[in-house]
Amino acid sequence: MKFSTFILTISAAACISAQNTTNTNATRTAELLEGLQKAPTRLARLNVLGENTDWLFDFTSGLGTTRSAGGNVTAANVANFPALFANGLAMTIGQMEPCGMNTPHTHPRATEILYLVNGEMEAGFIEENGARFVKNTLTKGQGTLFPQGSIHYQTNTGCDPVLFVAVLNNEDPGSSQIAQRFFGLPPNVTQATLGDIGLQEVNDLSTGIPDSMAIGLDQCLQKCGLTRGNQTMGQQQPRTSDNALSLNMK
Ligand SMILES: *[C@@H]1O[C@H](CO)[C@@H](O)[C@H](O)[C@H]1NC(C)=O
Ligand SMILES: *[C@@H]1O[C@H](CO)[C@@H](O)[C@H](O)[C@H]1NC(C)=O
Ligand SMILES: *[C@@H]1O[C@H](CO)[C@@H](O)[C@H](O)[C@H]1NC(C)=O
Ligand SMILES: *[C@@H]1O[C@H](CO)[C@@H](O)[C@H](O)[C@H]1NC(C)=O
Ligand SMILES: *[C@@H]1O[C@H](CO)[C@@H](O)[C@H](O)[C@H]1NC(C)=O
């Protein structure tokens, strides 16, 4: 069976049944993490990970999966797959809807290599101040790299779902969404940063930011005959008095 067929098959299986043959047991995961932190050597850690299934991560179980309008992301990291402890890597599987976009974000602790299983995708990044914008169109079977800390995005430019596999060189890579975090700063700070666009405008923009696997580009939606439906917005920055929206101000 071809790799892409295999991945698509296991993805489809996930919709039918989520069998808990693997580490979806939160109590077990907590026990393992506690044991691993106390284990001084590689051999000691092997003994902590005493069940063979402690080494298995089921990307179809729903564990580590976030579903949004533009697609699903399943992230295996040390928090949900303790076998990664002290191994320095993590993996993310992305299922992108037609025109879906993994919105601009950074991984503060990891460089990412991404492999596109099927279809076509645009991917771009900016590494730091002074760095040029790097953009590529990937087709099935191609991969690209996002340097640690770079602001990067991927968008499905086709009218069929696509699947990608990404490896990150840290077991705790972290993710920081640019729009959610920037618009989560105090609105007066965001306003001044944007050249004084107005507090009301900042408030309006802040409250409309969709979750990270979002519905993507207008040009793609038009090409595919799709319309931009409602999107979930659960990943915006929580507000306290220190970064409160000031809806009465203009
Ligand atoms: C399997 O794991 C999922 C996710 O942790 C949980 O919601 C579900 O209840 C579990 N199913 C069984 C049969 O244990
Ligand atoms: C989950 O893990 C705990 C701790 O290892 C264990 O006692 C419990 O039986 C497990 N539950 C299931 C449903 O496997
Ligand atoms: C995301 O997950 C849902 C629920 O399993 C599924 O219906 C949908 O097809 C998935 N999206 C993609 C792009 O695979
Ligand atoms: C989108 O949300 C609005 C306001 O909640 C609602 O009136 C509308 O029916 C929704 N549209 C779709 C396509 O779900
Ligand atoms: C900016 O707005 C925040 C609320 O979002 C407020 O707590 C803070 O005092 C304001 N800063 C200044 C310097 O006015």
Image (tube, grey):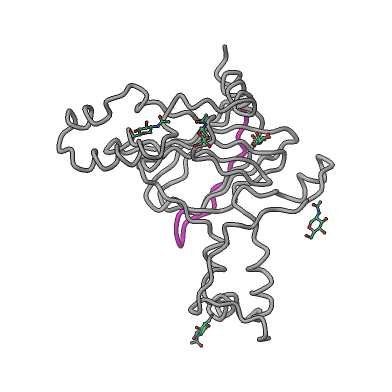
What is the x, y in percent for residue 222? 82, 46
Q: Is residue 186 magenta?
A: no
Which quadrant holds residue 158? top right
Left or right of 122: which side holds 24? Answer: left
Magenta extent: 126-140
Depth order, front residue of 127/154: 154
Outermost residue, bottom side: 249
Q: Residue drawn 70% across and 48% down?
A: 215
Vertical placement of 84 versus 178: above or below? above
Quadrant housing the N terminus: top right
What is the x, y in percent for residue 97? 69, 39
Left or right of 156: which side holds 76? Answer: left
Q: Residue drawn 57% across and 48% down?
A: 153
Depth order, front residue of 189/34: 34
Vertical placement of 37 versus 189: above or below? above
Q: Residue drawn 73% across and 32% down?
A: 160
Outermost residue, top side: 1
Left or right of 72: which side holds 158? Answer: right
Outermost residue, right side: 225
Quadrant housing the C terminus: bottom right
Depth order, front residue of 116/237: 237
Q: Is residue 137 magenta?
A: yes
Depth order, front residue of 212/178: 212
What is the x, y in percent for residue 233? 64, 57
What is the x, y in percent for residue 114? 50, 36
Which quadrant holds residue 232? bottom right
Vertical placement of 95 versus 175: above or below? above
Which quadrant holds residue 183? bottom right
